[in-house]
Image (spheres, helix red, strand yellow):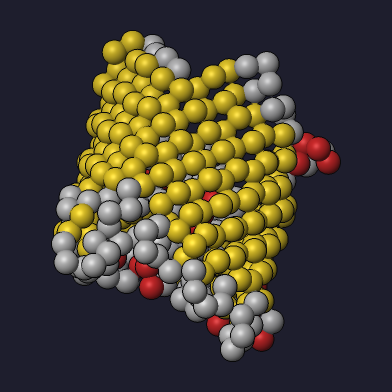
């Protein structure tokens, strides 16, 4: 608690500032502003010898400006500001406990000497009929918005916190760099093609390509979304002997299905080639979503999920297990609070396994 008060005082102000934020929006039908102020506190109980338990926090403010001068034209800019990195820089695990863009992520983004600017793009939509649309987007984009999306396991601000339940960690999706997307919607089908130029861990430029096909199915149970995607990159990644460069490539599925007005399920699976030096080559995850209608509070939500990953090639990790459960409760029309618990276990091929529990609290105020 002392760390929370000292390093992330904004966390305690979220509920107090909510009325101010609620009155801040006053724009016309062409211009909209959306802001989210998030405070997160996490404590890790590490099950490893010689490693101390610790706690960290972070405060994040995201501002989205959207300008819609006509039905077919759209401009959007997203800015992010943060203080603290939660547990991301101190835990020994292969997975990130909090998937949001935090202080270190917002400085020198992708080694571009750019700070705080997350997205800046223009989109033009061609309407061919009532149910057929073609959208073309270009600028600074976020690939995670378009590939491997999922209605029950996608948003680190309102759903799961761990990176493995926000996006497939074997899809190698990149955010906040130059790229373009072509999206075709035909009745229940959606097709997306994405290209992005960004940098790898060695500071080398490379191109990332992805294709995704999706189908929306309406049943008596509720809506279901079924997606299949594939990706590939340039030969810019070290092989296991670090003597050559290889490409990253793979494919995956992302499914979500409502079972009623209260219950829903999601499934993810992903596979990638292990010619390049990577941690994991296989991912399987799934979980359930429980809407607050079960206790007559439709804005509340519970999520429970489990993930399994196989270690790749000569990686030090043999396999990884992850579990997460969260409960989100609406405080007011403009704020909510989430209680979260995670368990992460990296089974190592040699040496001691890396395992521990992560307990978290997240508060959002938004307009």
Which image quarter holds the N terminus? bottom right
Residue shown at the point (68%, 49%) measured from the top left: 304
Residue 16 seen from this side: no
In the rendered image, which quarter is residue 244 located in?
bottom left
Residue 356 seen from this side: yes
Residue shown at the point (63%, 50%) measured from the top left: 306
Q: Give the left or right position of residue 335, taking residue 292 as reference.
A: left
Expressed as whole percent of the image width and height from the top left, the position of residue 27 reads 43, 44
Q: Residue furthest bottom?
A: 50
Against 137, residue 105 (above or below) is below
Residue shown at the point (59%, 58%) measured from the top left: 321
Against 328, residue 83 (above or below) is below
Against 190, residue 271 (above or below) is below
Q: Give the left or right position of residue 147, taking residue 303 as reference.
A: left
Front one among 182 and 93: 93
Q: Residue furthest top?
A: 129
């Amino acid at each position: 608690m002392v760390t929370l008060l000292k390093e992330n005082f904004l966390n305690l102000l979220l509920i107090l500032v909510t009325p101010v934020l609620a009155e801040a929006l006053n724009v016309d039908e062409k211009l909209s502003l959306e802001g989210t102020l998030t405070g997160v506190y996490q404590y890790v109980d590490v099950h490893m010898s010689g490693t101390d338990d610790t706690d960290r926090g972070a405060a994040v403010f995201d501002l989205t400006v959207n300008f819609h001068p006509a039905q077919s034209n759209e401009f959007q800019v997203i800015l992010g500001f943060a203080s603290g990195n939660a547990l991301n820089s101190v835990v020994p695990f292969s997975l990130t406990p909090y998937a949001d863009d935090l202080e270190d992520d917002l400085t020198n983004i992708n080694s571009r000497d750019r700070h705080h600017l997350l997205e800046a793009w223009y989109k033009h939509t061609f309407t061919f009929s009532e149910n057929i649309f073609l959208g073309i987007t270009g600028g600074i984009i976020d690939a995670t918005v378009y590939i491997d999306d999922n209605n029950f396991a996608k948003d680190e601000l309102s759903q799961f916190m761990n990176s493995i339940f926000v996006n497939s960690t074997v899809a190698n999706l990149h955010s906040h760099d130059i790229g373009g997307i072509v999206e075709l919607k035909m009745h229940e089908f959606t097709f997306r093609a994405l290209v992005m130029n960004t940098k790898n861990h060695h500071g080398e430029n490379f191109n990332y390509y992805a294709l995704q096909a999706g189908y929306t199915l309406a049943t008596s149970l509720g809506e279901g979304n079924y997606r299949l995607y594939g990706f590939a990159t340039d030969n810019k990644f070290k092989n296991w002997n670090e003597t050559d460069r290889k490409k990253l490539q793979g494919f995956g599925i992302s499914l979500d299905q409502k079972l009623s007005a209260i219950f829903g399920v999601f499934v993810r699976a992903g596979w990638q080639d292990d010619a390049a030096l990577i941690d994991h080559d296989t991912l399987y995850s799934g979980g359930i979503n429980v809407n607050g209608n079960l206790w007559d509070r439709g804005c509340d939500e519970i999520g429970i999920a489990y993930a399994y990953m196989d270690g790749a090639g000569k990686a030090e990790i043999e396999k990884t297990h992850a579990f997460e459960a969260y409960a989100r409760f609406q405080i007011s029309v403009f704020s909510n609070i989430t209680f979260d618990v995670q368990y992460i276990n990296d089974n190592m091929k040699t040496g001691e396994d890396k395992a521990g529990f992560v307990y978290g609290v997240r508060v959002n105020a938004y307009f």
